Amino acid sequence: MTQYAILANPGHNRIYFSYALCIAQQELTAVLGARGVEPQYTQASCEGLPPAVYFQTPEPLCEDALQAVRTCSFFYALFEVHEGGLLRPADVPEFHTFPEDLCHILRYTGKTNEQFTRLMVNLACSACKTPAATKKLLDPMCGKGTTLYEGMVRGMDVIGIEHNAQWVQETQTFLVRYLKEGRFKHQLTRERRSAPGGKKLAEFIQLQTAARKEDYLAKQYQSVSLAHADTRSTAQLLRRNSCDLLACDLPYGVQHASRQGAQGAQLSRSPLELLLEALPGWFDVLKARAAAVLSFNVFTLSWQEAAQALEQNGFQVLSQSPYTGYQHRVDQAINRDLIVAVKPAG
Ligand SMILES: C[S@@+](CC[C@H](N)C(=O)[O-])C[C@H]1O[C@@H](n2cnc3c(N)ncnc32)[C@H](O)[C@@H]1O
């Protein structure tokens, strides 16, 4: 047996962090499980070490598994634990294409915690069984882009849909400035999409970029698409069976009331109606064996309601460990949970 300790990232959001250690084991089990490794958790602790997750594996972790450990949302450093509690820092391979700061620079009210976003993307990656080497990640209500930045640093192609025009504009401004200041080569195009009758559906911003100049010159692009549109038009905006992963922090009712009704004037605290209207389109654009992870406030939507909505629309909900048990308190008004589902094969 090889014993390990992952030092947990103290994180930026202390409220989330107090729960992170409880859910870290679930995340690690999912991430390693997708690579055929089953970690066993030990009660071990090392004197003087800050909070850590202790586990053992029958064989030492291979490069690919070590790199996967590094993607865990709580990861700070990995140690091998030797006789007498001696710690040996493990050499863990990098996974970034774009630098990590891309996820952290933009700060605003309503931003989904970056660590939590990474957790959602990890669960989606673990549950996804599409064969694509480069995954396409969709956030169909992307706010100012936290999920998109997470996908970018991991080398994915990303697509965001957001109906708040100002947020779309600010996301675009931030991204272009980031790429310019970091001297990342990129090309920006715009496109207006209309429905058959001519009614405007979306304004699309497309970026082709690459973290390394050599990749850009070899046309090995990462693509970033951002649509100013209503997520209920997803099926009309994107190609069918084109996305591998979907991760979305649903509107919270308090900060992000979902707009409903013919005039778009009513404010609703529950995202359920919107979810029911959007899910058929989301299902359509996902590939077979793709995975979707949704997070929500349990005060406005229960896990069971979300599960029912997903299953009603053809998804298969993953209702067992390590895809359950993520509920945690964010603040007085928000108790957050997530749900993981896959689009069945065939
Ligand atoms: C919880 S926020 C997502 C925050 C995002 N993850 C971030 O970190 O910036 C939910 C988002 O859903 C958007 N939204 C609500 N209804 C929508 C709709 N019908 N179509 C597209 N976006 C919508 C809101 O404007 C809000 O930005």
Image: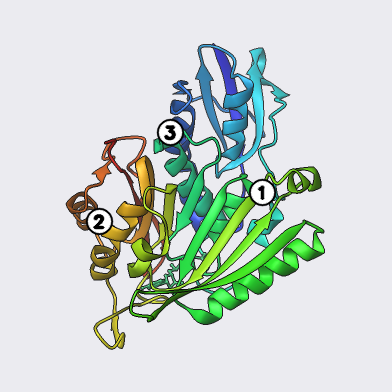
Q: Amino acid at mark 3?
A: Ala
Which numbered disc, 2 or 3, marks the residue that appears first in the sequence? 3
Q: Where residue 68 appears, x then y in whole percent?
A: 57, 32
Give above or below for 27 relative to 146: above
Q: Residues within 10 Å of mark 3 (few under 14, many from 20)?
A: many
**Does the residue at mark 2 contact the one at mark 3 (Cβ under 8 Å)?**
no
- Choose between 26 and 283: the one closer to the eye: 283
Q: Amino acid at mark 2?
A: Ala
Residue 227 placement (x, y as % from top left) = 50, 69
Q: Is residue 155 among what the camera can see?
A: yes
Task: Give the left or right position of residue 167, taking residue 342 as reference.
Answer: right
Q: How is the image coloured?
A: rainbow
- Which amino acid lies under the numbered mark 1 shown in the image of this protein? Tyr
Q: Earlier in the sequence, mark 2 or mark 1?
A: 1
Mark 3 vs 1, N-terminal side: 3
Residue under pointer 2 = 306
Residue visible at 55% across and 12% down in the picture: 59
Q: Quadrant of residue 72?
A: top right
Marks 3/1: CA–CA distance: 29 Å
Q: Quadrant of the N terminus?
A: top right
Residue at label 3?
30
Q: Quadrant of the C terminus?
A: top left
User: Could you tell me which secondary element the residue under label 2 belongs to?
Assistant: helix
The answer to whether residue 291 is left or right of residue 2 is left
Q: Which mark is residue 221?
A: 1
Secondary structure under the numbered disc 1 in the rendered image: loop
Q: Give coordinates of residue 196: x percent, y percent.
A: 34, 74
User: What secondary structure is found at the residue carrying circle 3?
Assistant: helix
Q: Residue at 58% of width from left, 14% of height from top?
A: 2
